[in-house]
Image (cartoon, rainbow, N blue to C red):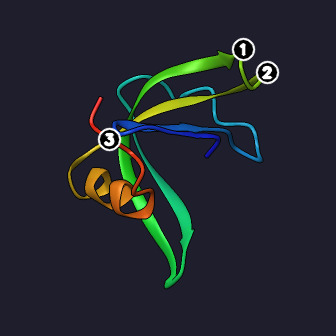
Amino acid sequence: ILDVSAEGVFVVSADPLPDAVGPGDTVWVSVPSSDGSVTLTGTVRWRGYHPGHQLLGCGVQLEGASLELIRTLVPSLKDG
């Protein structure tokens, strides 16, 4: 995860993502935490090159409990 917002994350994979992964797909992202790791669930909203990071990745909109969890893990996030 390279970027975190109140709505989602920008994810870059260490291994190339399968070509079939794209907008509308559900993804699971494991994140280290003080208790080991947690899994975030979301929907891919876009896939492509991020000019700010100069990398290929996916914009993932988090859902339900994952949205609340990321706000707990990153307290500085505010609703946009």
Q: Tag 1 or tag 3, which sits nearer the N-term?
A: 1
* Marks 2/1: CA–CA distance: 5 Å
- Residue under the point 39% across and 55% down: 70
- Label 1's element? loop
Eyeballing the image, is 1 above or below 70?
A: above
Marking on residue 51: 1
* Marks 3/1: CA–CA distance: 24 Å
Determine which residue is flagged by label 3. Answer: 78
Instruction: Give coordinates of residue 23: x percent, y percent.
Output: 42, 22
Q: Tag 2 or tag 3, which sits nearer the N-term?
A: 2
Q: Quadrant of the C terminus?
A: top left
- Residue under the point 45% across and 70% down: 38
Tell me the amino acid under the disc marked 1.
Answer: Pro
- Label 2's element? loop
| Dot in front, 3 or 2 | 3
Query: Could you tell me if the residues under marks 2 and 1 are in contact, i.e. CB atoms within 8 Å?
Result: yes
Determine which residue is flagged by label 2. Answer: 54
Instruction: Give coordinates of residue 77: x percent, y percent.
Output: 39, 45
- Residue under the point 26% across and 56% down: 68
Tell me the amino acid under the disc marked 3.
Answer: Lys
Query: Could you tell me if the residues under marks 3 and 1 are in contact, i.e. CB atoms within 8 Å?
Result: no
Tell me the amino acid under the disc marked 2.
Answer: Gln
Left/right of residue 73 with respect to residue 14 in the rendered view? left
Marking on residue 41: none
Question: Where, by quadrant of the figure, is residue 6 drawn?
Answer: top left
Left/right of residue 17 with respect to residue 70 in the rendered view? right
- Label 3's element? loop
* Marks 3/2: CA–CA distance: 26 Å
Farthest left residue?
64
Eyeballing the image, is 41 above or below 7?
A: below
| Dot in front, 3 or 1 | 3
